[in-house]
Image (cartoon, helix red, strand yellow):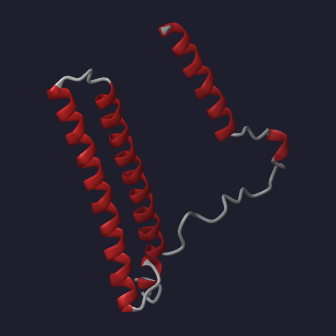
Amino acid sequence: MKKRFTQLSLTTSTLVAGLAFPVQTLAAISPGEPINPGKGFSTSIGNLINGALSFIMVIAALLVFLYLILGGIEWITSGGDKSKTETARNKITSAVIGLIILAASYAILLIILNFLGFGNLGDVFSNVKPIK
C-alpha cells in the first residue's frame, strides 16, 4: 500500500510539474533578440501590499479549513473515547473561531478603508510619489 501511494504521489507531482513549468525550446528564441521578461506582479507598493494581504488571507483560510478537517477526522476516529472526542471538539471550535477572526479582520479592514474613501490598499498608496 505504501509503495502504491508513493508511486501515485510521484506520478501526480510529475504531471503537475510538467503542466506548471512548460519547456520553451531554444528554437523559439532568435539570436540577438532581446529577452523581454514582461511586467512584474505589482506596479506600486500599494498593489504589492494588497496582493500580499490577499495571498495571506487565502493561505490563512486554507489552513483554517485544513484544521477543521483534521478536527473532523479526529472526531470520527475517536471511537467514543471521551478525551479524544473532547480534543477533536476543541480543535473544531478553534478552527471556527479562527475563521470568524479572519473574516472579521478582513471586514474591519474594508470598513476602515471605505470609511476613509479608499477602495482597497492599492488606492491608499496610489498618490504617493516615489523617492528619488
Horizontally, is 47 left or right of 8 in the view? left
Horizontally, is 97 left or right of 114 in the view? left
- Identify the residue shown where x is 35% and y is 64%: 103
- Quadrant in the rendering for residue 117: bottom left
How far across and down, in percent of the image, does residue 9 sit?
Answer: 55, 22
Which is more toward the observer, 111 or 93?
A: 93
Is residue 132 something one can see in this rendering? no
How far across and down, in percent of the image, does residue 119 sit?
Answer: 47, 83
Up-down relation of residue 127 to residue 17 (above or below): below
- Identify the residue shown where x is 44% and y is 58%: 55
Up-down relation of residue 87 to residue 2 (above or below): below
How far across and down, in percent of the image, does residue 37 sit?
Answer: 66, 58
- Quadrant in the rendering for residue 80: top left
Is residue 113 something one can see in this rendering? yes
**Quarter containing the C terminus:** bottom left
Up-down relation of residue 92 to residue 118 (above or below): above
Horizontally, is 16 left or right of 92 in the view? right
- Identify the residue shown where x is 44% and y is 76%: 46
- Identify the residue shown where x is 24% and y is 40%: 91
Up-down relation of residue 39 to residue 125 (above or below): above
How far across and down, in percent of the image, does residue 15 sit?
Answer: 66, 29
Which is more toward the observer, 2 or 10?
A: 2
Q: How many marks?
A: 0
- Quadrant in the rendering for residue 58: bottom left
Which is more toward the observer, 3 or 45?
A: 3
